[in-house]
Amino acid sequence: MTSAVAPITPELANAPEPFSSNKPSLIGMTQTQLRAVASEFGSPAFRGDQLHHWLYVLNERNPDNMTNLSKSFREQVFAHYQVGCLEKVSRQNSKDGTIKYLFRLNDGEVVESVLMAFQNRGTYSICLSTQVGCAMNCSFCATGKLGFTRHLTVAEIVDQYLFVQADSQQEIRNVVLMGQGEPLHNYDNTLAALRILNESAEVGMRRITLSTSGIVPDIDRLAKEELPLTLAVSLHAPTNEIRSQIMPINKKYPLEALMPSLHRYMEASGRRLTIEYLMIDGLNDSPDHADQLGRLLKGLRANVNLIPYNPISKSLPNVPSYRRPSRERVFHFSERLTSHGKKVTVRLERGVDIDAACGQLANRQSSKR
Ligand code: SAH
Ligand code: SF4
């Protein structure tokens, strides 16, 4: 069944205004923290609850429209705080409906978020970033080429969701932590942001997917949180030899450490995992590799998502000469893996023309102020 996705109009009543201010952001605060803000100005707790409702449920970014709050209360609050913490630098629309946002943060760093439209489902997913750059240095990834600059704050993660929702005026169905950065390297802020999205912005945990390159102690820590989100793991190779070649993290947490942690996660959470498998022509995409992968995943309740390599900009440092495999090769790999009893899907490339596809996010047309 196909249903059309509503067109996105740029002129919107409550579209966020750019700002340049270093006041603390209210977005990113919990309900308890917003009550504390109200009491800071001598107002009762329910004023904090009203602020909470405006910010997260109504996603209103203009204080002038928060009409059930007195003018003097608003003046006091917004003299010291700002609504959010992102300034839109650009918004690029892809031919396939994908929209990439580039945001400037208060310290001048920049970060990207991607809104993906699935025409056949009529729904939107948002891909959020968790860090400026990334420390994991995977050979195939544009973000990895930037190196690590800093973790995003709770506010910066939450505000990507709210800003894009307000700006695009779309109902966002799924949240995927697959933008820039390694979410588990920024564990505390990522988890706090997910809790706010869940508890305040009403994003169901089951609609959230967290993708990791495989930081074993943090996978164990996440298992203990007992959150019904989907854990996606960037496995990308069936052997240590290949994985270490493309993902340096594998030297620290090789497959004999990673795979048991995935089994522990599966047992503790009772949830099916997603295994992401990047396919690079001639490197990890043969039928033998599919067999090796099938054996490696034996007993693990996991769906496999094949991601044909998306080329990254040659202007980045140390870009390898990887190529995307042919459709036939992807198809044969998929068939072979399916014969091992795995459910296999191939990830659609989204927004390749605007460098918004997996692994292509590198803030290319940006510069610091
Ligand atoms: N750091 C996390 C999440 C962000 S990357 C992680 O690595 O899992 C999201 C996904 O895009 C990961 O599976 C990543 O391996 C993949 N990816 C990175 N570079 C890519 C590229 N050039 N082509 C296709 N997928 C890529
Ligand atoms: Fe970081 Fe993920 Fe890119 Fe690897 S693939 S460098 S972990 S963002």
Image (cartoon, rainbow, N blue to C red):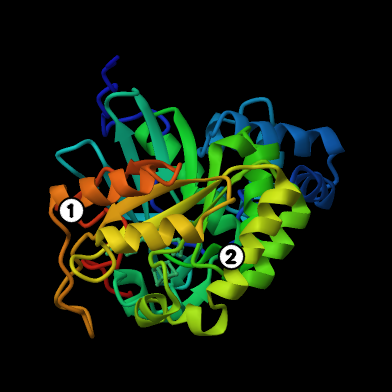
Q: Label 2, on which residue?
A: 259
The residue drawn where x is 54% and y is 78% is 254
Q: CA distance from mark 2 to mark 1?
A: 26 Å
Choose between 214 and 94: the one closer to the eye.
214
Label 2 SS = helix
Q: Position of residue 231 (x, y in %)?
A: 57, 51
The residue drawn where x is 41% and y is 38% is 125
Choose between 334 and 172: the one closer to the eye.
334
Q: Is residue 21 left or right of residue 217?
A: left
Q: Looking at the picture, which amino acid does disc 1 mark?
A: Arg
The residue drawn where x is 62% and y is 43% is 229
Q: Position of residue 205 (x, y in %)?
A: 63, 39
Q: Label 1, on which residue?
A: 329
Label 1 SS = helix
Q: Looking at the picture, which amino acid does disc 2 mark?
A: Met
Query: Which quadrant, please, contains the C terminus?
Result: bottom left
Residue 24 visible, this orientation: no
| Marker disc for residue 78 | none
Q: Earlier in the sequence, mark 2 or mark 1?
A: 2
Q: Position of residue 294 (x, y in %)?
A: 43, 55
The residue drawn where x is 49% and y is 67% is 213
Choose between 311 and 288: the one closer to the eye.
288
